[in-house]
Amino acid sequence: MATLHKLTIKEIQNLEPAQKEGAEKSLSDGGGLYILARRLKGGNVARYFAFWRFDKGIKKRLGIYPELTLKQARNLAAVERSRLEGLKGKQGYNMTFKEAFEQFAEHFISVNNLSAASQASLKSVYSSQLIALENFKLTDITKRVLLKLFEGLTTKQNRAEQVYQWLNRFFKHAIHHDILSINIMEQIDLKSIIGKKKETKHAPHLGTIAEVKELKERVISSDFKLATRQCFLLALYTATRSAEARKACWDEFDLEGGFWNIPAEHMKKRKAFVIPLSKQILEFLKTLHTKEAQIQGKEPKGLLFTYKGKELSQSSLKNLLLSLGYSNDKLTPHGTRGTFTTIMNELRDQHGLDFDIIDKCLAHGETSKTIASYNHAELLKHRRKALQFWADKLGAIC
């Protein structure tokens, strides 16, 4: 055990840092207690007691000397030591990061029904960056250790944010399950490490109804694969993501009630979403349903759109647009959502709907006071009006 009470009053009074403003010098009293002297502007020196917090990787200020006496500082340090001894009873005291993170990952994946893509992303973050922490005891992971981890990510903003998010989730989980008592990530200022986040580059999109109607007609008259063209039209009329349209199954549609009930596992944010269907898209789906029933000789099941019996690929809709002369810098499948919100906002004087209603059609979060003021039925009614207005502008799907 470290020797306690090594400091004397004379040593404290004579402790002088370098003449440079902000310079510091410290002496230890043992047992985690320090006296620190700091050079202030104008040359004066401030002396204060601090206690080394191994669980946070910082020196906790106890008070300024001589207002706080050496005896009082030692008493406060004794209280801190007692508290830290209590941490040894927690699971995290002897647990390695690898052991704890494996428990966290298994729990997080199960509770959040994490998709295969998200699980692959987590695995990539761990094997590339977090693996550097795996042999650390949890109580040895300090701010300094984490800052060193982020040093190699100063030019990789997206990956740095991913690492930060997963570590923050992990430490919150550890606190909730009584493995640790503090979240060390609260001491990490990501912006100061990676700088200001680059401005989001929005997907290229169309700007007028005339352009969208031309796109629709070109898709319909194209000789590209029929299933791909039909899938694109569903996404265009409902303002959904291409993945949601590609994964659409017959049992998700209520053709009598006029709703598309997208399950959580198909949604980007893993939250189920209901889309009120316009008259045009309902007629399109009912016609498709009838044809499929005739072909299969029974009630259609499974995916709406397939190629050689399988789900359409991620690149299928993109290749359709390329075949029609829409390069990636002119329009992308995701850009149809930007097209919808841009044009709908420009035509608000015609449909009279609030911006937040239009945004909610894209399954964005309910963050505004406007959205919060609607109940579920009211919101569906307004969204149906928005999507019907959009479909009326585009016209029938012939």
Image (cartoon, rainbow, N blue to C red):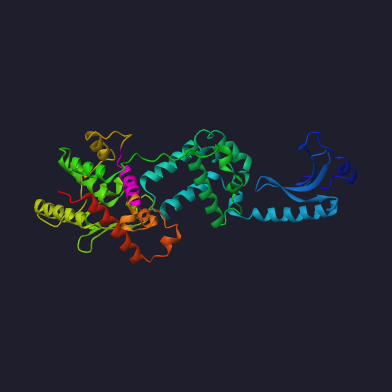
Vertical relation: 277 (above or below) 213: below
Residue 140: quadrant of the picture: top right
Where residue 296 appears, as percent x and y from the top left, is 11, 52
Q: Is residue 337 magenta?
A: yes
Q: Nearer the viewer, residue 394 or 201?
A: 394
Against 345, residue 372 (above or below) is below
Which residue is depicted at the point 61% across and 50% down? Answer: 93
Indicate the position of residue 129 as horizontal and vertical percent values. Answer: 50, 37
Q: Nearer the viewer, residue 50 or 345?
A: 345
Residue 102: in magenta span: no
- Residue 117 seen: yes
Residue 318 x %, y %: 27, 38
55 on left or right of 36: left
Helix, strand or loop for the magenta stretch, by majority: helix
Picture layout, residue 352 above or below residue 313: below
User: How many numbered markers are drawn?
Assistant: 0
Question: What percent of the width, then of the height, locates residue 292?
Answer: 13, 52
Give me the residue at 41% from left, 39% from top.
Answer: 201
Query: Dividing the picture into quarters, in which one does residue 176 lie?
Result: bottom right
Question: Would residue 263 be seen by someone viewing this image from the given angle?
Answer: no
Extreme-right residue of the structure: 10
What segment carries the magenta color? 331-345
Identify which residue is drawn at 49% across, 35% down: 156
Work out which residue is located at the far front of the displayed protein and give it: 349
Q: Nearer the viewer, residue 10 or 43?
A: 43
